[in-house]
Image (cartoon, rainbow, N blue to C red):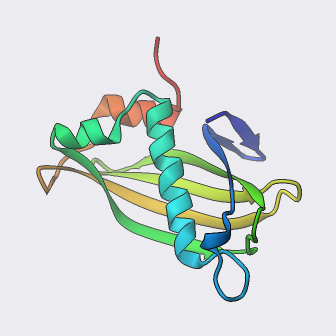
Amino acid sequence: MRETTSPGAVWPGVLEMAVRDYELDMQGIVNNANYQHYFEHARHEYLRSLGLDFAAMHADGLDPVVYRIEIDYRRPLQSGERFLARLRVEREGRLKLVFHQEIIKLGSGETAAAARVVVAMTRLGRPVPVDEGIARLLVEGRCEA
């Protein structure tokens, strides 16, 4: 992940990816379900880039669970296109984190899709407040040395 900026927003998580042929539908564009895979992969890589391990969190009984996802599809992606999956995080109350995510086509800079992903933290299946250290790390987007 690397940092980039957009007018009015800082995107601490940025991951470059490419469309694979098997992700296309009969129209020759990326099937809508694959955007959720792109967004999820970007979130997991963002956690990893900050030293957080999704599997280790689960082993400790702590799970970030997608509570709601809203996706706006703006411009279709096609076979072989390269794109950036970028994100930023903010708190929403004590129990939730909101991941604002975009998929940006390389070359044209067009937004292919934008998502608002609300994540709730659970411990052993029950909602728990977001740990302050984890929240700060995700929102600020950097490890503290």
Task: Give the farthest residue toward the bottom.
Answer: 26
Q: Nearer the viewer, residue 136 or 15?
A: 15
Residue 133 picture location, percent across and down:
33, 28
Identify whether 8 is placed above or below 131. below
Task: Give the farthest residue toward the right.
Answer: 108
Q: At 44% across and 38% down in the image, what residue appears?
A: 47
Task: Give the farthest residue toward the top.
Answer: 145
Q: At 52% across and 26% down in the image, what residue appears?
A: 142
| Lateral position of residue 124 relative to residue 101, left or right | left
Number of numbered discs overlaid on the protein picture:
0
Q: At 78% across and 47% down in the image, what residue appears?
A: 7
| Lateral position of residue 15 relative to residue 54, left or right | right
Residue 31 picture location, percent across and down:
60, 78
Task: Give the farthest residue toward the front.
Answer: 22
| Lateral position of residue 109 relative to residue 131, left or right | right
Q: Nearer the viewer, residue 61 or 81?
A: 81
| Lateral position of residue 11 relative to residue 75, left or right | left
Residue 14 picture location, percent across and down:
64, 42
Q: At 58% across and 77% down in the image, what residue appears?
A: 32
Residue 111 picture location, percent across and down:
75, 63
Identify whether 138 is placed above or below 117. above
Quarter of the image holding residue 59? top left
Image quadrant holding the N terminus, namely: top right
